Image (cartoon, rainbow, N blue to C red):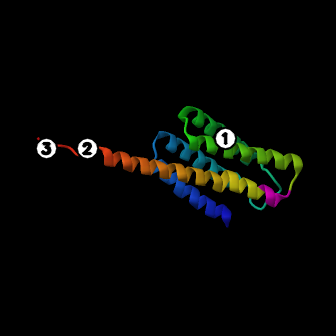
């Protein structure tokens, strides 16, 4: 249930970022949306034995792209998103090395790389909307001459 609920939230939040965001917001939303869709498409349903190679590779690529976006855009939300994605990739490796409980692995990756990442993006996109409205209200009205 929470996989598909997260996917719906991903579609809504990333769609919002792609529709209303500026350049960095759109790139970040695109990275997360593509990674999320690929992860769902390549996930081996019914296999909850730990990290799957295709999903780990997707998360590593998404991590590197978010880090590059953070270096380029210099925005706080991209730094937080990168940190969450780094923690998700670290969880993949920790689960593979230590063989900790599968539910722990699923919960950690779902909360950090899933809902945590979406919350970070939703806050960033909301702040962008507020700033856009403030700037729009500060522009002087055109004068008729």
**Image point (62%, 60%), residue name:** 6
Please state which of the two labelled residues, at mark 1 or mark 3, is closer to the viewer.
Answer: 3
Give the residue pinned by disc 2: 140
Q: Which residue is label 1 attached to? A: 63
Identify the residue at horizontal 43%, vertical 51% (top origin): 130
Q: Label 1: few (<14), some or many (≥20) within 10 Å?
A: many
Of helix, strand and loop, which mostly describes the magenta segment? helix
The residue most toward the bottom is 1
Q: Earlier in the sequence, mark 2 or mark 1?
A: 1
What is the quadrant of the N terminus in the image?
bottom right
- Dot 3: what SS? loop
**Residue 44 showing in the rendered view:** no
Q: Can you tell which mark lies on residue 144?
A: 3
Q: Alpha carbon of mark 2 to alpha carbon of mark 1: how far?
A: 42 Å
Q: Please identify, in this view, whether the residue under mark 3 or under mark 2 is nearer the observer.
A: 2
Magenta segment boundaries in residue numbering: 101-105
Tell me the crowding category of disc 3: few under 14, some 14 to 19, or many 20 or more residues within 10 angstroms, Cα based.
Answer: few
Q: Quadrant of residue 64?
A: top right
Q: Is residue 84 visible?
A: yes
Name the residue at the top extreme.
72
Q: Where, by quadrant of the figure, is residue 60 drawn?
A: top right
């Amino acid at each position: 249930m929470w996989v598909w609920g997260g996917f719906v939230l991903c579609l809504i939040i990333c769609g919002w970022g792609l529709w209303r965001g500026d350049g960095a917001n759109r790139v970040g939303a695109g990275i997360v949306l593509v990674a999320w869709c690929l992860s769902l498409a390549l996930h081996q349903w019914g296999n909850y034995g730990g990290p799957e190679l295709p999903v780990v590779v997707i998360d590593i690529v998404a991590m590197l792209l978010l880090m590059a976006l953070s270096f380029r855009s210099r925005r706080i939300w991209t730094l937080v998103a990168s940190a969450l994605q780094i923690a998700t990739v670290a969880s993949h490796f920790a689960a593979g090395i230590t063989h900790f409980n599968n539910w722990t692995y699923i919960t950690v990756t779902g909360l950090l790389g899933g809902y945590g990442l979406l919350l970070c993006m939703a806050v960033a996109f909301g702040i962008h909307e507020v700033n856009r409205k403030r700037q729009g209200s500060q522009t002087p009205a055109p004068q008729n001459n």
